[in-house]
Image (spheres, coloured by chain):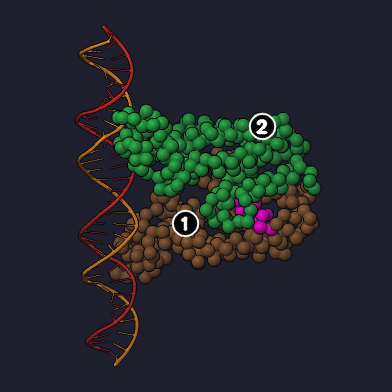
Chain colours: A green, B brown, C orange, D red
Amino acid sequence: MVKRGYHHGNLRQALVDAALDLIREKGPTGFTLSEAAKQAGVTPAAVYRHFEGREDLIAEAARQGYEIFADLMQYAYDKGQPSALAAFEATGRAYLAFARRYPGHYIAMFESGISVNRNPDLAAVARRAWTVLEKSAGDLSRHIPPEKRPPASMVSAHIWALSHGVVELFARNSPGSQSPFPPEDLLESGIGVYLRGLGLIPPDA
Amino acid sequence: MVKRGYHHGNLRQALVDAALDLIREKGPTGFTLSEAAKQAGVTPAAVYRHFEGREDLIAEAARQGYEIFADLMQYAYDKGQPSALAAFEATGRAYLAFARRYPGHYIAMFESGISVNRNPDLAAVARRAWTVLEKSAGDLSRHIPPEKRPPASMVSAHIWALSHGVVELFARNSPGSQSPFPPEDLLESGIGVYLRGLGLIPPDA
DNA sequence: TGTACATCAGTGAACGCGCGTTCACTGATGTAC
DNA sequence: TGTACATCAGTGAACGCGCGTTCACTGATGTAC
């Protein structure tokens, strides 16, 4: 990672890292290619040896984020086994944990405005992350009597939406940050109520 | 609203309207003061007769959004009376309806990065909107036995987060837009499950 | 081991652009008498 | 009703800036013989 002499050694990744830093600090708007280059100790023009341009660099940052994200989700899912419930709750927590631990990635993925369909790699890895959550919801569904069982994809959409909403509103300097509850508690309790609503947790537990 | 001659007549509002249009079309990033001025048929410099600058213009757009938003929430709440449940569900739906009908305002409020604490007017009206939801959640809480009753502010935070997540992920060109469910259904069913979880709707209804 | 050469990753200067903002100005409006 | 004048809302030119991108270039690296 240390730059020595004319050749950088690992400029591509250094640029991604710089981009992630800048995106975290200044938001996706504040991020500039030139500044990322500067932070990597290199001329703006050098960026074009590794990326097609500004957008492409952001997309790569997002892609790496999805990669980490999918791994974390998978890990949480596995760790919760063999309990479908434990696995499901763990994936929910993993969402928030990811947003907390990798804010730059999170912003690049969800707030930078880049489309997941921008390139196939990005689409594939996003799909992988999404699939874990859906699988987890599917496992859970099987414990609900078929006639009152909502589609697994709907359950996962609910939890994704709740998690995302908690992150956006309560885990940032956003409108809801004056809330008296830590985001983790908010998500935990919200998922708890939701699971009761599905009949998966006894009503008075 | 028609510009005639040298003086515009209602430039201040025309600029806000132009800003809302541009924010909706191009996102908060794509919005520029110059373009808003142009769209209002005026020189960029004229903007400074009415606003302190770019940020101030966005803040005013957001403020007007919160005003409409608070009114809609209040209206939904009133309309649901005297049923606490109906009122609560109506406010949830109002959230999504607002996001759909006033996308420019919504983006200015929640995605432009401006802080609600930027000026007192903005903070006050945001507080007003938030208060309606909290009151609605409070009414609802009273139907839950005290010992298993979550704080009203927590319930409202859950619903806000769920609503916001649904909007961000499923009602835009965002990552989740490939979902097979319309956002309205997603929110409706999510709130339904949640209310069952609170014991406010019979388990098998 | 030494040399020639192809390949590659960087430089640095230059570009055109549109941005937000400032300034002295001027045209239009409204009011006092 | 007409005139003088203050006030106000716009103009238009100019600014400095940093941006993303291009281009011909050059220094470093690695490989064939």
Q: Is residue B10 left or right of residue A135?
A: left
Residue B131 appears left or right of A148: left
Inspect this view and state whether residue A132 appears: no
Residue depicted at x 72% and y 30%: A82
| Residue kind at label 2, given as amino acid type | Lys
Q: Of helix, strand and loop, which mostly describes the magenta segment?
A: helix
Residue plotted at (55% across, 43% down): A100
Dividing the picture into quadrants, the one containing residue A22 is top left
Residue B31's spot in the image, x, y percent?
Answer: 39, 53
Q: Relative to residue A25, is residue B102 depicted above or below?
A: below
Residue indicated by mark 2: A79
Give the class, few, some or many, for how many residues have Cα within 10 Å of label 1's Cα (few <14, many ≥20).
some
Of residues A95 and B196, which is closer to you in this image? A95
Chain bearing tag 1 is: B
Q: Is residue B178 magenta?
A: no
Whether the residues at callouts 2 and 1 have beta carbons within 8 Å, the answer is no
* Viewer-side residue, B68 vs A169: A169
Q: Which disc number belongs to residue B114?
A: 1
Residue range corresponding to the magenta coloring: B152-161
Residue B65 at x, y percent in the picture: 51, 60
Q: Nearer the viewer, residue A182 or B94?
A: A182
B21 in relation to A35, above or below = below
Q: Nearer the viewer, mark 2 or mark 1?
A: 2
Q: Where residue B163 sits in the image (x, y, percent)?
A: 60, 51
Residue type at mark 1 is: Ile
